[in-house]
Image: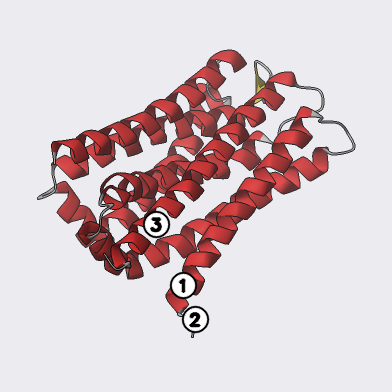
Amino acid sequence: MKHNDLEKNTISYGLSLAVTSLFSALLVVLKELCDHSVLVWMSKATGHHWMTHGIIDVVLFVALGWFLGTLNGGHGVNISAEKFIKTVVGSVVISGLIIVGFYMVDMLAG
Amino acid sequence: MIKFADVALMTHATFGMLCIIASVWVFVDTLNASRGNVVRIKLMSRAVAGFMWLAFLVGGYWYVTYYYADKALILKGPWPFAHHLVMETKEHLVIMLLLLTTFLPIAASGNLVANKSARNVVLWVVGLIILTGMLMEGSGAIIGMGVKLAVLPK
């Protein structure tokens, strides 16, 4: 099934990528700010907080991509190609800036 | 005697570079998408994802197993930012890169010959992969330099 030129899976997993990227960036900030609770839990869950972070992201990406594909009676999300590209690229760039910005501020603050 | 940790680290960097090379291939082929190269674009998109997953898994193993020693050296050396800023950023941006490369074969599964929108999605995604991948390689060099400067005689 196609939506405005793009395949359903492209839109579903692309939007999932956009959401997961932002979630991942915010999780970085959360675990670093809550290093006595969130970071400890993430470290204990798999033996290393980074492994837990990666697993959560991959599972979220796959699950959300699948879920978005089931919306609208299995036709997926209806979005224009232009808006879709802006959403995905914008999300990835903003997520990257959140991560770089956080560690920059964290380092400068000492 | 070459240590296993060093082999793992170089394997990680090599797979990362192969991922970038394959991504450039996909970018150029997609700019010139036709019936003659569309199968190759789809295969190379899978190669991008495959190389990235290998780089991620090998690098991840090295990071959780061996990096603590390098981290201690970096923090005592003249370039502590190589850990505080560069490695901390790299280890989290690389997860985003993993998702981008995993998405690439899905984006490339569309009708790239007839559909300009599908081609644009692939070009944007693979463009982000190339830029982020080069950032990762450069970050690795800075981290390595952080270790090197820490062990050089003062």
Residue A37 vs residue A32, the one in the foreground: A32
Spot occupied by residue B147 in the image (x, y as percentages of width and height): 34, 62
How far is the residue under mark 2 from the one under mark 3?
Answer: 19 Å
The amino acid pointed to by label 2 is: Ile
What residue is drawn where x is 19% and y is 44%? A32
Question: Which chain is home to disc 3?
Answer: B
- Locate residue A108 relative to residue B69 in the image: left or right: left
Report crowding for label 3: few under 14, some 14 to 19, many 20 or more residues within 10 A (C-alpha).
Answer: some
Q: Which residue is mark 1?
A: B6
State whether residue B21 is above or below residue B32: below
Please tell me whether mark 2 or mark 3 is closer to you in this view: 3
Mark positioned earlier in the residue sequence (1 or 3): 1
Q: Quadrant of the C terminus of chain B?
A: bottom left
The amino acid pointed to by label 1 is: Asp
Residue A60 vs residue B4, the one in the foreground: B4
Q: Which mark is residue B145?
A: 3
Element type where label 3 sits in the image: helix
Residue B18 vs residue B153, the one in the foreground: B153
Q: Which mark is residue A69?
A: none
Q: Which mark is residue B2?
A: 2
Residues marked 1 and 3 touching at CB (< 8 Å) = no
Report crowding for label 1: few under 14, some 14 to 19, many 20 or more residues within 10 A (C-alpha).
Answer: few
The amino acid pointed to by label 3 is: Met
Q: Is residue B113 visible?
A: yes
Residues marked 1 and 2 touching at CB (< 8 Å) = yes
Mark positioned earlier in the residue sequence (2 or 3): 2
Of all residues, the one furthest to the bottom in this rendering is B1
Spot occupied by residue A75 in the image (x, y as percentages of width and height): 58, 24
